[in-house]
Image (tube, grey):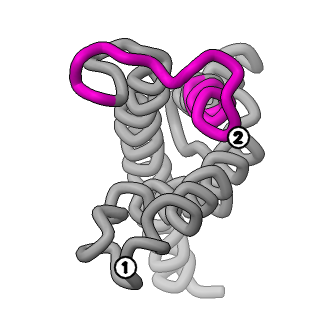
Amino acid sequence: MTTDTRTATTAATSADTRTAKRDDVVLGVFRLVVSFLFGFHGLMGLGFFGGVDGQGAAVPFGSWPGWYGSVIELAGAVLVLLGLWARPAAFVLSGVMAFAYFTVHQPVALLPIHNNGELAAVYCWAFLLLSALGPGAFTLRRALRR
């Protein structure tokens, strides 16, 4: 191997490392923002931040699926936010949002723009992405490993 080839290989490896680190940071920030916002969604079902009706009402305690969904949303959002068991938690949250879309929004109309289900669809796909790609940077799990 010539010196020029080694230099080119080293430069390419260095660029790949920088790109991987950047992607890891971007994915970590995405995870933090999505899970933080989603946590408020779960808290609203429990009566916080205006509640489910804007007047502070919570979903009735123990009701299916509303109350249990809110608890799952909040617990999952915290796990994803912290980066603990983020992949399985994100997968469950993706399923929760798919369930919400098909049981609450889709019966009203077919398209999300017509049934007010855009947010459920976006969260479903965002959490599916996180379950496939992982949590990225800034996780409690990484911090504990160090």
At which x and y percent is residue 108? 39, 72
Residue 54, compared with residue 21, is above or below; it is: above
Asked if residue 85 lies left or right of residue 21, the reply is right
Of badges 2 and 1, nearer the viewer stands 1
Image quadrant where one finds the C terminus: top right
At which x and y percent is residue 7? 47, 73
Q: Is residue 126 magenta?
A: no
Q: Which mark is residue 146?
A: none
Asked if residue 25 lies left or right of residue 100, the reply is left
User: Secondary structure under badge 2?
Assistant: helix
At which x and y percent is residue 101? 50, 63
Q: Amino acid at mark 1?
A: Ala
Residue 129 found in image quarter: bottom right
Q: Residue at x 63, y 20 (%)?
A: 140
Q: Residue at x 46, y 26 (%)?
A: 45
Task: State whether residue 139 appears in this view.
Answer: no
| Marks 2/1: CA–CA distance | 29 Å
Count of labels in the image:
2
Could you say which is closer to the camera, residue 106 or residue 49? 106
Could you say which is closer to the camera, residue 122 or residue 114? 114
Residue 92, compared with residue 115, is above or below; it is: above
Image quadrant where one finds the N terminus: bottom right
Could you say which is closer to the camera, residue 114 or residue 88? 114
Residue 98 found in image quarter: bottom right
Query: Magenta region: which residues?
Result: 53-74
Q: Amino acid at mark 2?
A: Ala
Label 1 packing within 10 angstroms: few (<14), some (14-19), many (20+): few
Q: Earlier in the sequence, mark 2 or mark 1?
A: 2
Q: Which mark is residue 109?
A: 1
Label 2–label 1 contact, CB within 8 A: no
> Label 2 belongs to which residue?
89
Q: Residue at x 45, y 50 (%)?
A: 27
